[in-house]
Amino acid sequence: MNSIKDYFHTDWSAMTQHDWIGLIMTIVVFFVMVGLYVYVLHPSNKNRLESQRYIPLDDEHVFNNQVPDHFPEHSAKTKISEDKK
């Protein structure tokens, strides 16, 4: 039986251009997914992401020719600041 080192051996000099592209894309996608998981599962981002929870189901603005308000906390702040002026 071969050793584990022989089993996982890679002949780097025999890799073609397509092999390198696939390897680089796999590594990049891995790090992007890790970054997204950290962003989505970080507790400080919960309110920001929960406020956009129903965007896929929000299609009323399409039929009524209205602009959707996906960030109500931002629009409330601007309304308050406009009222103070």
Image (cartoon, rainbow, N blue to C red):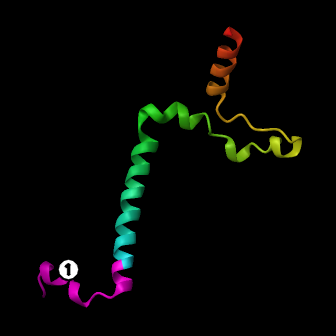
- The image quadrant of residue 15 is bottom left
Name the foreground residue: 71 vs 57. 71
Determine the residue located farthest toward the top in the rendered image.
Answer: 84
Q: Residue at x 13, y 86 (%)?
A: 2
Counting labels gives 1
Quadrant where the C terminus is found in the figure: top right
The residue identified by callout 1 is 8
- Specify the quadrant that holds the N terminus: bottom left
Q: Position of residue 84 (x, y in %)?
A: 67, 9
Outermost residue, bottom side = 14
Q: Residue at x 35, y 83 (%)?
A: 19
Q: Is residue 41 above or below residue 81?
A: below
Neighbour tally class for label 1: few under 14, some 14-19, many 20 plus, Cα within 10 Å? few
From what the image shows, is residue 23 above or below residue 54? below
Q: Judging from the image, what secondary structure is the residue with disc 1 in?
A: loop
Amino acid bearing label 1? Phe
Considering depth in this image, is 68 or 41 the residue closer to the camera?
Answer: 68
The stretch drawn in magenta includes residue 70:
no
**Could one spot residue 85 in this view of the protein?**
yes
Residue at the (62%, 27%) spot, across then down: 74
**3 and 62: which is toward the camera:** 62
Question: Where does the image place residue 35, in percent across and percent down from the top left?
Answer: 39, 50
**Residue 18 falls within the magenta-colored stretch:** yes
Say which quarter of the image contains residue 21: bottom left
* Start-end of magenta stretch: 1-20
Q: Vertically, is 77 above or below 68?
A: above
Which residue is at the far front?
85
Residue 10, given in percent of the width and then of the height, sits at 21, 83
